[in-house]
Amino acid sequence: MQQNPVSSAHAAYDTTWRLTHLGRLMGHALRRFDERVLVLMARTVEVPLALSNLAARDQVGAAHIHITRHLAVGGSRLTELAASAGMSKQAMGDLVNQCEAWGLVLREADPHDKRARRVVFTESGLLWLEAFRCAVAQAEAEFRQAVGDDVATVVALGLEAYALH
């Protein structure tokens, strides 16, 4: 019986690196962190009940966190917001539409260019942003507790150095 050379090569080839490489680990860590932040936000009394219910029912996801992370408190143009979040203008537009329907943001005329529109937080959106700040602080504290202060500091410094290059 003739042995398939491709099958033999695959049998001897170690593929465990695909599950443990740094990019995959960072991706898993980010998803875990964001999921924890959303759970904490769903429990925050200051978040409007409708938004809290959306978060509790997993209707709010990582994409919605992009607006929370990247929208300037004073507002941003859609193109700026999309670029900051690393998303296409169309994808960000869809996300803004959904967040606008939920009452997190609204579009208003840009005071510097009447032809342009800015996306701004609503009052509920600012409460959401504050809940996000508190949830991030809590999730970071939990991370520090889980891995220890020294490891958490090294991870933070390493990620900061890597992200800024």
Image (spheres, rainbow, N blue to C red):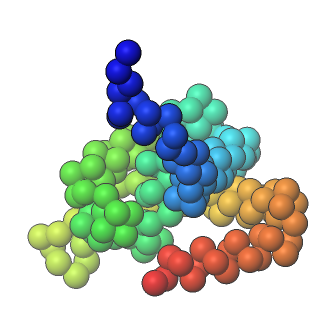
Residue at (59, 28) in percent of width and height: 57
**Residue located at (73% from left, 41% from top):** 43
From the top left corner, tell me how far across and down residue 164 is, in percent.
49, 82
Instruction: From the viewer's side, name the closer residue of 125 and 40.
Output: 40
Q: Would you identify the image quadrant in which residue 16 lies?
A: top right
Observer-nearest residue: 122 or 84?
Answer: 84
Is residue 27 visible in this depiction of the protein? no
User: In screen coordinates, is 150 left or right of 87?
Assistant: right
Determine the residue located farthest toward the left in the rendered image.
115
Question: Residue 72 sits in which quadrant?
Answer: bottom left
Is 162 situated above or below 12? below
- Rendering coords of residue 92 (x, y %): 30, 53
With respect to residue 65, does 158 lie above or below?
below
Which residue of the protein is positioned furthest toward the front in this rendering? Answer: 1
Residue 153 visible from this viewpoint: yes
Residue at the top extreme?
1
Residue 74 picture location, percent across and down: 42, 74
Residue pictured at 34% horizontal, 63% vertical: 86
Q: Is residue 52 left or right of residue 115?
A: right
Left or right placement of residue 134 versus residue 18 in this view: right
The residue that appears at 57% across and 83% down in the rendered structure is 161
Q: Quadrant of residue 117?
A: bottom left
